[in-house]
Amino acid sequence: MSVEKVPVCCILGQTDCGKTKLLEYMGSYDDIKKQQNHGGRRDAFFPAKYIEERAAAAAAAEEREVDGALSINLPGLLIVDIAAVDLDSNKRLRAWLSCDLPVLVLDIAAGVDHEVIELVKLLRLFRKDFVLVLNKVDKLLGWRNCPNTPISRAVPLQRTEVQSELSSRIKQVKTALTKEGVEAVRILPTSTVSGEGVADLLVTLYDHIQKTMAEKLYYNDACTAKAGNGVVLC
């Protein structure tokens, strides 16, 4: 068998939560092969080699070994951003159904609001795993910028009161999601100003898909004669 399907992640979130800037920050490197803007939708393809390089850089920063799971031969990730202004119910539904792993982005200062609740209801309905991004940690009072570092390294460099504030906000979000009956695969604080946690997000998406969905991405000879279904996001 050989890998045929590139795994797709879809970024959805609050208005002005910084999700488009998050994608732009992830795609601001020369190694990105493709980044396109299609009206209200932006997408970028991140090759496996690029993600593995980010994983190695993050591991080096944390002085640890790279997780061996990243050696699985997936071609990369296609990450699609659906603009908030276009988030009508049908488009949200198509995006949620078509992607392999959704990314829910929140403004850490705003927390869980009515927009997030509506998105969470879709997650609960279709029982989708998802990664939760708490963006704009640089807006926390007293946050010390640590450019492009893993969040696990950036947090210990903050003052005690900043760490406590971050922990409190994460706990509030977890509690709100639990009340809605969902739980994130991982919660990642990020900053699209100084880059903390951005590389972590790429590695987390790639690693989780490899560990839980790899078999679904392989070409199956038994399915060659069957018709396939497509989804148009426009």
Image: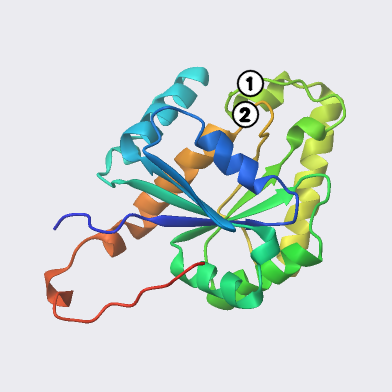
Nearer to us in this view, 197 or 86 = 86
Q: Is residue 171 above or below residue 112?
A: above
- Label 1: which secondary element: loop
At a point 17% along the width and 68% down the height, the residue shown is: 220
> In the rendered image, which residue does mark 1 sit on?
147
Q: Position of residue 202 (x, y in %)?
A: 48, 40
Quick check: 113 left or right of 101?
Answer: right
Residues packed near mark 2 inside 10 Å, few (<14), some (14 to 19) or many (20 plus):
many
Q: Which mark is residue 72?
A: none
At a point 70% along the width and 23% down the height, the residue shown is: 156
Colour scheme of the rendered structure: rainbow
Q: Quadrant of residue 167?
A: top right
Q: Quadrant of residue 3?
A: bottom left
At a point 43% along the width and 61% down the height, the residue shown is: 100
Q: Label 1 near label 2: C-beta < 8 Å?
A: yes
Q: Is residue 9 above or below residue 122?
A: above
Q: Earlier in the sequence, mark 2 or mark 1?
A: 1
> In the rendered image, which residue does mark 2 sit on?
195
Q: How many marks?
A: 2
Q: Work out which residue is located at the far front of the displayed protein and give it.
A: 39
Residue 172 visible at all: yes
Q: Position of residue 157 (x, y in %)?
A: 71, 19
Residue 181 visible at all: no
Cα separation between marks 2 and 1? 5 Å
Nearer to us in this view, 130 or 21 = 21
Q: Is residue 8 above or below residue 68?
A: below
Q: Position of residue 47 (x, y in %)?
A: 34, 40
Quick check: 212 left or right of 84?
Answer: left
Quick check: 59 left or right of 118?
Answer: left
- What's under tag 1, amino acid-wise? Pro
Q: Position of residue 76 (x, y in %)?
A: 34, 45
